[in-house]
Image (cartoon, rainbow, N blue to C red):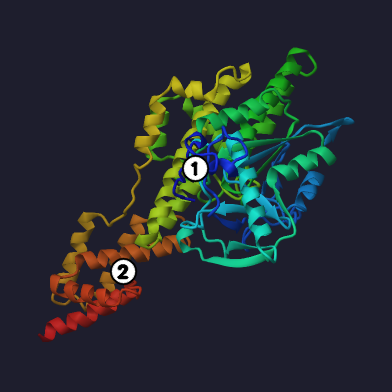
Amino acid sequence: MTEDEVPVENSSENSPEDDEECPDSDSPYFDLPNYLLKIDHFSQIQVLTGSDIIEGAPNFRGLRGFPIFGTGQPTEEAFLKILEKIPKVEDGKILKVKWYNMRQEPVLYINGLPYAPRDPKNPHANIEIEDAEPEMLDNLQRAFTTIIQSRVDEDPNNQVKVHKDSSFIENPMERQDMEESVKVNSVVNFEEILENLKATTLPGLEVIRIPVAEERAPMEKSFDLMVNTLKGETASTTCVFSCQMGRGRTTLGMVIASLIKEVQLTAELNKMAVLGLVSEETVADLIKTKFETPLPTTQDDDDPFIKGEFEVIKELLEKHPEMKEGKKKIDYVININGPSPKGIGIQNLRECIIETKWKYDVAAEEKQGVLRQMILNFLERYFYLICFSTYTLEQGPGGFLETFVSWMDKRKTLREMIENGKDKLEWYRQVDPAKLNTLKELINSPDYKDNMGKLIKTVYDFAFQTYADLPRGPIKNNSMRKLAAKTLLEILPPDIAQNVNKKMEEQQNTSFDFVTLIGLVSYYGEDAEHQ
């Protein structure tokens, strides 16, 4: 979501006493003793349905045709269930399994359930750490485990206070926090669980942390971390990605891995053709079948914003034509990793931009700030994915000899483009000013009450035309009603407008929709006639 950044201080500036919580004196210090402990799971965390559901592994899924899997943060018991679902042995050989922890925040387990620290001032958002490094975050996780174990040891009943959301609501401002005490039987962190699995169950397991802030674009060096851990592997290496819910960050990891593995598999197939093991025609057919199979269509596919045609994206393609192929490739990969019917996931990393914008359009003004920041974050993330896709198509066949950071350094204007261009959106819609004159003529006429039916219909028609790009459904209906009410307030005669606004100020806790406003206009219009 849209969390405030949490300050990170360098431990070298603190006294030894201040450093006691941090196992490594060279790692950045992060003040966690007063942070809340919040459970990762909530009542509506499971979005996917079907036969592949794993109890305790929210939204577990596998990408069709690839050894790529994603999940929300599993319970301690669910780890073994996940390992039962993924390929571990091929031709009698133990396969490598790379588990990617896509989270910045520490994760520890109390009685087998996952928890993470939260800022007491902002308990509904995961903490963010600027310029986070994997080693520092691993140290932070161990330190937080020590802090929580101390809380347990100091309590006479071995209890600890924990927090949870009463239910999941996308906008953090609308969530309700609940506190309870839990008797603790065991405290262990995420890293320890996976290392134990490696020692006892899966020797081919490798644990990798890719620090990504929730719902944001990854740092450029995080893309390179992914590339470096996969570029020397075969396409058959299994990858598992996890974050809290298994939504944004997990999907991001799966998308990046899909791009890299496509390059690897294409290279392997082309090598077979060069060696004469299969014909070039067969290889071409295999690549097309694997990576270009047409996907199911939906009624919104032709919407320019569903296709990602935002101003800054159009600018990117216009100034850098080579990005068109990168966009085409990443759009396909995003779709197969997104929701049904095209994919197997729970978030489309392109479509979520405009979907959040639709929610912004109908949200109350005091709740729009969080949604606005989410839209900007999503758009920046999509921009970077197009760039990375183009980089992968250029650098992948040669073995990724150049890093993504270096590639971006040679194209520094791209960073300026997204920073300056991501805000070029229509944040506030309004009826065409020329059409307002028609409405003003209707409401200012002496017999406007007789024309009330025509007035209402005309306002709604104009609102419908203004939101013609939105698909049918409650979001479109609410957007039209909200715009119709706003338009009516703009065209009211001064004497009626004064009375209506005064009434609204007196009843600030009351929602004044379009129908209610029509009633007020009629009422105060009669008062004006009798004065």
The residue under the point 72% across, 21% down is 268
Horizontally, residue 353 falls left or right of residue 456, namely right
Q: Determine crowd level at label 2: few under 14, some 14-19, many 20+ residues with C-alpha closer than 10 A.
A: few
The residue under the point 47% across, 39% down is 9
Q: Which residue is outermost to the bottom?
A: 530
The amino acid type of the residue labelled 1 equals Arg
Is 302 or 19 nearer to us in this picture? 19
Horizontally, residue 416 falls left or right of residue 128, namely left
Q: Quadrant of residue 379?
A: top left
**Tag shown at residue 85:** none
Circle 2 sits on which residue? 457
Q: Residue 278: percent from the left, percent from the top?
A: 78, 19
Do labels 1 and 2 touch, CB within 8 Å? no
Where does the C terminus fall, quadrant-wise?
bottom left
Give how far apart the Cα atoms at labels 1 and 2 are: 42 Å
Q: Residue 144: percent from the left, percent from the top?
A: 61, 48
Q: Is residue 246 visible?
A: no
Q: Residue 342: percent from the left, percent from the top?
A: 62, 46
The residue under the point 15% across, 70% down is 493
In the displayed structure, would residue 133 be above or below residue 299?
Answer: above
The amino acid type of the residue labelled 2 equals Lys
Circle 1 sits on which residue? 216
In the displayed structure, would residue 307 be above or below residue 76?
Answer: above
Q: Determine crowd level at label 1: few under 14, some 14-19, many 20+ residues with C-alpha closer than 10 A.
A: many
Q: Earlier in the sequence, mark 1 or mark 2?
A: 1
SS label for mark 1: loop
Q: Which residue is outermost to the right?
A: 92
Which of pointers 1 and 2 indicates the residue nearer the eye?
A: 1
Horizontally, residue 460 falls left or right of residue 374, namely left
Q: Residue 315: percent from the left, percent from the top?
A: 38, 32
